[in-house]
Amino acid sequence: MTIIFGLIVTITCLLGGYAALGGHMAVLVQPYEFVIIGGSALGTFIVANPMPVIKDSGKAIGEAFRSAAPKERDFLDVLALLHALMREIRSKTRTEVEAHIDAPEESSIFKAYPKILANTDLKFFICDYVRLILLGNARPHEIEALMEEEIQTIGRDRLKPYHALQAVADGLPALGIVAAVLGVIHAMGALDQSPEVLGHLIGAALVGTFGGIFMSYGIAGPIATKVKVVREKQNRIYIIVKQTLIAFMSGATPQIALEFGRKAISSKDRPSIDVVEEEAISAPVKVAAE
């Protein structure tokens, strides 16, 4: 919603200021200039990126418009799930715990948190490292280094749409100049026409430059930045999982390990320790109810 509100404010102020200066709105209605700019931008975007990135860019734009960053409830679910798994590791046999991570779709623990179960990357990230804990052969610092490397890889992959969209934003001003040059070429073919006709054609050509710059700095660039912000916040969940499991591997109790994970949450979204403890304590009850 913030993107839509911001675009409304931007366009309203832009066009309102232009009209207040005495500008004629009809001059800005040059659909073919925008077809040249937008079509060329779309074409170069398709040329520059593989199909998985193109598809993910559409998904990322949708997430940006919905502001689909994790909220306090999402962090609490992750911490409660980790607490339940750590309790299982401490109180159950290895075979019993492996049943949860080998088939998370059938696990009563994972089924209690459907949003995590639906997040395939996060689900397997948790399962893979819980499995390494169960094996018991790796040292905490080795697992931590491996986690950090995987989190960096996940972060790079999830920011590919941002880089792709930012490249489009960077190229839009140049594409606007291309549209303007084509407009000027068209105007040069009408030098024998009246000054009114020639002035209209030149004005239409200059709309191309305006359109390219505005689409870059007023639309594509801000949306790309929003994509980056949302994706980076989503990636924060993996750091929370890492901090929690590494603390547990180093000998912390499940309750203390949760505090390590809680501290990795941004202060703006971080739940209080009392809320985390309440969620963690109620988690076994919730799982049992399933």
Image (spheres, grey):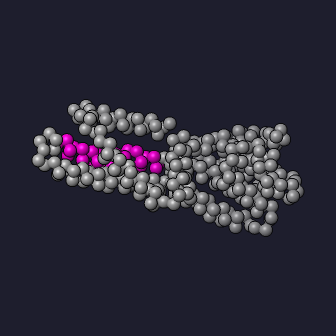
- Can residue 235 be seen in this snapshot? yes
Residue at the image point whose x is 66% and y is 40% from the top: 73
Locate residue 201 relative to residue 101 in the image: left or right: left
Whole-percent x and y of residue 43?
A: 41, 55
Position of the C terminus by quadrant: top right
Q: Residue at x 70, y 38 (%)?
A: 275
Magenta span: predominant SS is helix
Residue 50 point in image, percent of width and height: 51, 60
Q: Is residue 229 visible?
A: no
Region in magenta: 199-225
Q: Nearer the viewer, residue 143 or 226?
A: 226
Give the total number of marks visible in the rendering: 0
Give 281 or 19, whichever is nearer the viewer. 19
| The stretch drawn in magenta includes residue 222 | yes
Q: Is residue 260 left or right of residue 12?
A: right
Question: Could you tell me which residue is drawn at 76 percent across and 58 percent down?
Answer: 130
Q: Residue at x 32, y 37 (%)?
A: 14
Left or right of 202 on screen, residue 253 = right
x and y percentages locating residue 203 in the rendered image: 21, 43
Q: Quadrant of residue 97?
A: bottom right
Examine the structure image and report whether residue 165 is included in the region drawn in magenta.
no
- Across and down, in percent, residue 45 comes to 44, 56
